[in-house]
Amino acid sequence: MKNLLLAIDFKDGTQKLVNFATEYAQCVKAKLWVLHVAAPEPDFVGYEVGPQYIRDMRATELKEEHRELKKISDGINFKGIQAEGLLINGGTVEMIAAEIEKLHIDAVIVGHHKHGFWHKSFFGCTDTSIIDKSKVPVIVVPIVKKVAIL
């Protein structure tokens, strides 16, 4: 195994996912590509680009995501594992599938967030869609939300 792709979304559990992928990459002596797929531009494909303040806000979000991605990949490199961060725009599943081909990925690592019926009905399940489209093994890491105790 030479290339692993870690798909992250910056939601709860990202650090757990990064830790797992880092350990796995170290075990198999592979390069770790850390990928975040940002929403396509404009957010509503087929519509005119919004007012300038919306574009400025989106640019700020993308810069922050890029900084966070660099911080993650630098942390992995610091541990002696070759890593590179990628931030791309587009549809999540389609872009992950394209990067698998482009980077000659041997396995993909994704997190699984438990969602209810309504969320799945409206948004689908990204991890399941990746499994369906992927031509390489997909390692799914369960992400458990912390429950606040009152």
Image (tube, helix red, strand yellow):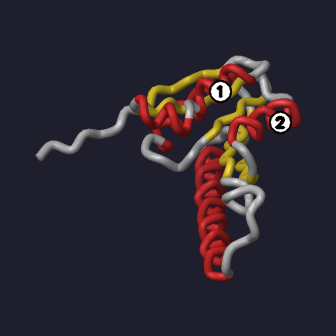
Q: Nearer the viewer, residue 47 or 39?
A: 47
Residue pointed to by mark 1: 129
Q: Nearer the viewer, residue 115 or 104?
A: 115
Using the image, determine if residue 82 lies above or below residue 140: below
Q: Nearer the viewer, residue 59 or 44?
A: 44
Question: Does dot 1 land on a helix, a strand or a loop?
Answer: helix
Residue at the image point whose x is 62% and y is 75% from the top: 54
Q: Residue furthest front?
A: 47
Q: Find residue 76 and report its image quarter.
A: top right
**Mark sitting on residue 80:** none
Residue pointed to by mark 2: 98
Residue at the image point whose x is 74% and y is 53% from the top: 89
Amino acid on which disc 2 is placed:
Ala
Residue at the image point whose x is 78% and y is 32% from the top: 97
Q: Say few, some or many: other residues with alpha carbon within 10 Å of mark 2 (under 14 / 14 to 19 / 20 or more).
A: few
Q: Find residue 22 and report its image quarter.
A: top right
- Tell me residue 144's x, y (percent): 37, 32
Count of numbered marks = 2
Asked whether disc 1 touches disc 2, contact meaning CB atoms under 8 Å apart, the reply is no
Residue at the image point whose x is 72% and y is 40% from the top: 33
Q: Earlier in the sequence, mark 1 or mark 2?
A: 2
3 to the left or right of 34: right
Camera-near label (1 vs 2) is 1
- Tell me residue 2's x, y (percent): 79, 26
102 to the left or right of 74: right
Question: Does dot 2 land on a helix, a strand or a loop?
Answer: helix
- Tell me residue 73's x, y (percent): 65, 49
Amino acid on which disc 1 is placed:
Ser
- Tell me residue 64's x, y (percent): 60, 66
Query: What is the CA distance from the residue labelled 1 to the residue labelled 2?
Result: 14 Å
Q: Find residue 114 and report its image quarter.
A: top left
Q: Nearer the viewer, residue 89 or 3?
A: 89
